[in-house]
Image: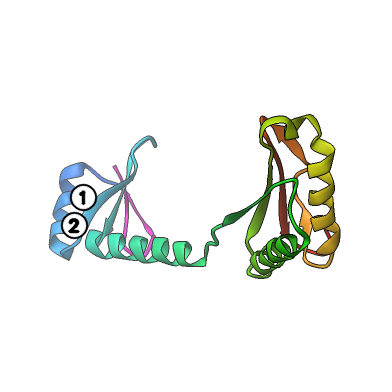
Amino acid sequence: MRLVDPSGGQVGIKPIEEARWLADQLGLDLVEVAPDARPPVVRLMDYGKFKYEASVKAREARKNQTRTVIKEVQFRPKIASSDFDVKRKRVEKFLQHGDKVKVVMRFRGREVTHPERGCDSVERLVRAGEDGGTVETSRRLVGGHLTRVLARGRGL
């Protein structure tokens, strides 16, 4: 076995019994760090301290990561102007908070035969909030739903 001391220096190639004896004398654990190497590499270390430091690093990594939140706002083709303004303000608020917004135009019954009416409302929303974000996906008509995803950025 290739033995590595606690500071990272090479001790040399030693038999396993001698490595265990040395670990016992130093009050440390013998941890196999590279089992596939020839000869296998083992290290003298305090395994409890190693596990604790690994958990601290993982916690720091989780703390620094950001989660992408997608909020959804649903419309209908026959929306009143006051209701449209409420939905537009909600979309702008979500974008200001850094969330992505999925705009869904829901068609019912025969409304799906005239998707351009719904597209006009969605485009009006995009034009109204040009300083709030960017269009992340182009419009898609799937089933009775027309969707578009907006994200924060310069100009829609």
The residue pinned by badge 2 equals: 23
Q: Is residue 155 visible?
A: no
Residue at horizontal 37 percent and vertical 35 percent from the top: 36
Q: Is residue 134 visible?
A: yes
Q: Amino acid at mark 1?
A: Ala
Q: Secondary structure at mark 2?
A: helix
| Label number found at residue 8 | none
| Residue 90 coordinates in the image, percent (x, y) | 66, 65
Image quarter of residue 47: bottom left
- In the image, residue 4 lies in the stretch drawn in magenta: yes
Q: Nearer the viewer, residue 24 or 154?
A: 154
Note whether 152 is above or below 147 in the view shown: below
Q: From what the image shows, is residue 63 above or below residue 124?
A: below
Image quadrant containing the C terminus: bottom right
Q: Which residue is nearer to you in this view: 149 or 66?
A: 149
Q: Nearer the viewer, residue 114 or 96?
A: 114
- Determine contact: label 2, label 1, CB under 8 Å: yes
Assign a secondary structure to mark 1.
helix
- Please report the residue visible at 83 percent of the width from the left and 63 percent of the height from the top: 128
Classify 10 Å Cα crowding around label 2: few (below 14), some (14-19), many (20 and above).
some
In the shown orientation, is residue 87 left or right of residue 36? right
Disc 1 designates what residue? 19
Q: Which residue is located at x 57 percent, y 57 percent?
A: 69
Q: Which residues are magenta?
A: 1-12
Query: In the displayed structure, does residue 15 sit left or right of residue 67?
Result: left
- Disc 2 to disc 1, C-alpha distance: 6 Å
Q: Is residue 15 magenta?
A: no
